[in-house]
Image (cartoon, rainbow, N blue to C red):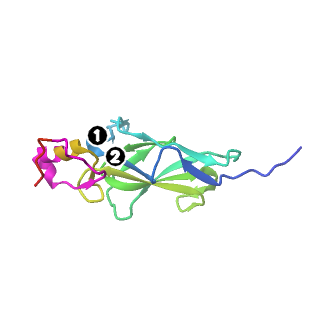
């Protein structure tokens, strides 16, 4: 019989998360819970693909943990996350998804190997949850809806309006 020391997870990498952030636009739909506490309305979701390294680690299982921002006292979480990393927005806000190597997790205050992802669910109610303007259609839509003038926006891309003949500046 040969006894070999178990190899621990040494790193966690994300396959499909860039700049450690996932952005949801609340106008695309939010999930909620029905009267029987079943999750409904989950078409607007994102599956986080994370991998534990090295490949020969004994326990490569990962835990997905919701971390609410300290200054957010809302009882409803910003998002929910399944055990396999499917993130579903529940309300506007900013919170953290902590992906933890299972073999390094003791409890919420004691874990040694994790990576954080900021989850932004934009509802336009504050600068932290501002809607991102990514193209000319987003910009034009603001001017077409007078209710949208009271919301917060941030320009996420350079926008070329030279080919838009009917655009009227906002304001």
> Residue lying farthest right?
1
Q: Nearer the viewer, residue 32 or 134?
A: 134
> What residue did someone put label 1 on?
28
Q: Nearer the viewer, residue 52 or 107?
A: 52
Residue 4: give its label: none
Q: Is residue 84 left or right of residue 43?
A: right
Is there any visible trace of residue 57 in the rendered image?
yes
Magenta residues span 141-164
**Would residue 88 be counted in the magenta stretch?**
no
> Residue 30 is drawn in which quadrant?
top left
**Residue at coordinates 31% horizontally, 48% vertically from top-left?**
91
Q: Secondary structure at mark 2?
A: strand
Q: Residue 1: x percent and y percent? A: 89, 43
> What residue did someone put label 2 on?
24
Q: Nearer the viewer, residue 17 or 71?
A: 17
Q: Residue 157: x percent and y percent? A: 30, 51
Decide: marks 2, 1 in contact (CB < 8 A)? yes
Q: Is residue 166 left or right of residue 39?
A: left
Q: Residue 44: x percent and y percent? A: 35, 38
Q: Quadrant of the C terminus?
A: bottom left
Label 2, label 1: how far apart the Cα atoms are: 8 Å
Is there any visible trace of residue 77 in the rendered image?
no
């Amino acid at each position: 019989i040969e006894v070999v020391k178990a190899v621990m997870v040494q790193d966690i990498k994300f396959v499909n998360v860039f700049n450690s952030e996932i952005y949801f636009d609340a106008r695309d739909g939010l999930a909620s819970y029905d009267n029987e506490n079943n999750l409904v309305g989950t078409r607007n979701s994102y599956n986080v693909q994370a991998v534990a390294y090295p490949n020969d680690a004994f326990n490569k299982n990962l835990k997905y943990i919701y971390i609410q921002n300290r200054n957010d006292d809302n009882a409803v979480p910003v998002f929910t996350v399944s055990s396999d990393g499917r993130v579903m927005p529940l309300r506007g806000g900013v919170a953290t998804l902590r992906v933890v190597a299972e073999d390094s997790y003791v409890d919420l205050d004691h874990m040694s190997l994790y990576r954080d992802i900021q989850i932004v669910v934009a509802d336009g109610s504050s600068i932290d949850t501002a809607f991102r303007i990514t193209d000319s259609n987003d910009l034009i839509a603001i001017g077409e809806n007078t209710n949208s003038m009271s919301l917060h926006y941030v320009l996420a891309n350079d926008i070329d309006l030279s080919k838009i003949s009917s655009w009227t500046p906002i304001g």
